[in-house]
Amino acid sequence: GECYTESGDYDLALTDYTTLMSLEPQSFKPWYFSGGVYFLKGEYDVAIREFNTALEMNPDHSFSYNDRSSCHLKKENIDLAIRDLLTAIRLDPGVALFYSNLGSIYRKKGEYDNAIKAYNNAIGAEPGYVEALNNRGSLLMENKKFEQAISDFSLAVTTDPEYYPAYNNRGIAFFRLKEYEKALQDFSRAIELNPVYETAYLNRGIVRETIRDASGCCRDYKKAAELGNEYAVKYLQLECNE
């Protein structure tokens, strides 16, 4: 079932998990894994039902609460999502993922202080957790704390030199500080790591436009547009007459 899930063969995975439910009727795991597959399929109500069954069988399984929270979030049931994550944290307070997910929900709600606190807890639980560093840095940047944001992005790429989202975000922070060469370097590094990263092409194009590199910005806008970035299409029309 896990192999089928990883390869995207969701129906085959569900068939295996259904079989396992019959073979191991006392185990919560087939229900938990089945819920994960339904989540990937976008069938959130069914996924919640499967996680509910898993939790009836094992009320202390923190990851079932975490994953059910993700379903609630997809359905815009924010309070239920938070409640499940707080339960997951109470059951297993050492899992950085739970705090990071909680931070992202608070960020979505616009609760800046709660989001920062949750990201701090995630990084405290796992100091090298690059996703939490990147998320905290993004939130700091939204609140114009660019130097602090750069510190988080820098720690993320030091921890994982191939984590391209942090290069892109650090590039944005450098751009906002008018450090254009550093911004270009970071966007270029993000593109080097992920050659189909449309957002980095768009952002590099914006920097090149700002420093009056007309041909360079048009090349980047064109590439971003080819990769499906709608903003790049507009910039290409406005700035490059294409």
Image (cartoon, rainbow, N blue to C red):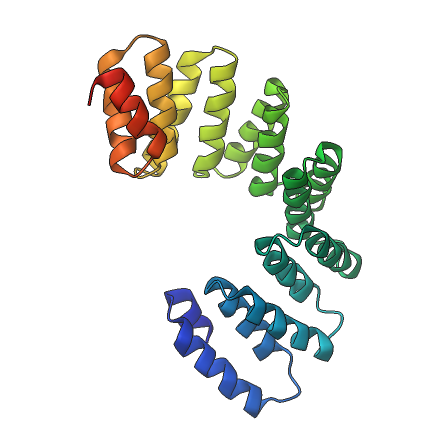
- From the viewer's side, name the closer residue of 11 and 240: 240
- Look at the image and tell me in which quarter the C terminus lies: top left
Q: Is residue 99 left or right of residue 158?
A: right
Residue at horizontal 46 percent and vertical 72 percent from the top: 2
Q: Is residue 127 visible?
A: no
x and y, in percent, of residue 133 in the image: 60, 36
Q: Is residue 94 above or below residue 57?
A: above
x, y percentage for residue 225?
27, 33
- Most extreme residue toward the left is 242
Residue 212 in the figure: left or right of residue 97: left
Residue 84 can be seen, yes or no: yes
Residue under the point 75% across and 56% down: 83
Q: Quadrant of residue 35?
A: bottom right
Give the camera-side residue of 75 and 217. 75
Residue found at x 46% / y 82%? 16
Q: Is 76 rendered above or below residue 46?
A: above
Q: From what the image shows, is residue 17 above or below residue 62?
A: below
- Give the image quarter of residue 54: bottom right
Q: Position of residue 10 (x, y in %)?
A: 41, 71
Residue ranking furthest to the right: 90
Q: Residue furthest bottom?
A: 23
* Front residue of 95 and 19: 19
Q: Nearer the viewer, residue 129 or 41?
A: 41
Give the residue displayed 44% in from the left and 29% down from the top: 168
Measured from the top left, where is residue 27 in percent x and y?
Answer: 64, 83
Left or right position of 236 against 28? left
Horizontal side of 82 relative to 210 (left or right) equals: right
